[in-house]
Every structure is written in C-alpha cells, then in structure tokens.
Image (tube, helix red, strand yellow):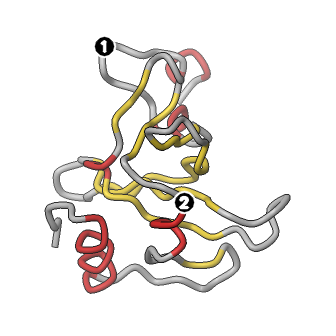
Amino acid sequence: MTPETTKITSGSLIAAERVEGTSVYNFAGEKLGTVEDIMLDKVSGKAIYAVMSFGGFLGIGEKYHPLPWSTLKYDEAKGGYVVNLDKKKLEGAPTYGMDDDFHWTPDYGRRVDKYYGAPTFW
C-alpha cells in the first residue's frame, strides 16, 4: 500500500493502520488506553476485537485487553472510541501481557465475549 492510499477515508471506512494508536475512553471521558491491534475474522473480513493496551506506567506493567468490536463506538468529537467501561471493570478483564507468548483460542474468545456481555463470535 502506498502512503497515498493509507490516507484515504470514505464515510465510515478507515484503514486499520489509522485505527491503531487511537485512544479509547469511557463515558466519563477518562482515557482508558490505546488500540494496539485489530483482530479480524479471516472469512468475513469483519473486525471482531480491538486489542487495547491498559495499565502500567511508562509502558511497564501494561497489559493487552481484547475488547469485542461491538462494544466500541467512535466519537468524532474525541477522535477516539468510547466504551461503557470503567477502570475497575478492566482490572478484572481477560488480559495477556505484552511479553507473553500468547495464543488466541476460541475458548479465550468466548471468555472475552462473556465478560463484556457481547454476542459471541465463536
């Protein structure tokens, strides 16, 4: 992809590389973290999870929190995503460490979906 094509947006479409690094806020306006990655379904091409970094200090102790894509709503005024979560709920959420040798499984996906009360992809 050339630099020119990555800058193209159309209506509600956006390049994945532009989503990465986008801030995630709760309804109280607190910044919870940043989208680090997007998990896509290989068959449908739909975004299923946003992987958000949360916690830690200066990158130390930070964890990855997969959020069901359906829980994120884009807020143009904030220039980021808003979720109906508070920091306390995130502290008990399914996570994995930045340095972990993590392998995504359907069981883990179901656990994430159940925790957030989202329709299960699996």
- Mark 1: which amino acid? Gly
Q: Callout 2: few (<14), some (14-19), or many (20+) C-alpha neighbours within 10 Å? A: some
The label on residue 71 is none
Residue located 23% across and 74% down the image: 114
18 lies left or right of 49: right
**Quadrant of res 97:** bottom right
Q: Are marks 1 and 2 in contact (CB under 8 Å)?
A: no
**Label 2 residue SS:** helix
The label on residue 11 is 1
Q: Position of residue 81 (x, y in %)?
A: 45, 36
- Mark 2: which amino acid? Lys
120 lies left or right of 33: left
For disc 2, the marked residue is 87
Residue located 50% across and 19% down the image: 5
Q: Callout 1: few (<14), some (14-19), or many (20+) C-alpha neighbours within 10 Å? A: few
**Label 1 residue SS:** loop
In this picture, is 89 found above or below 27?
A: below
In this picture, is 120 found above or below 97?
A: above
Query: Quick one: label 1 or label 2, which is nearer the N terminus?
Result: 1
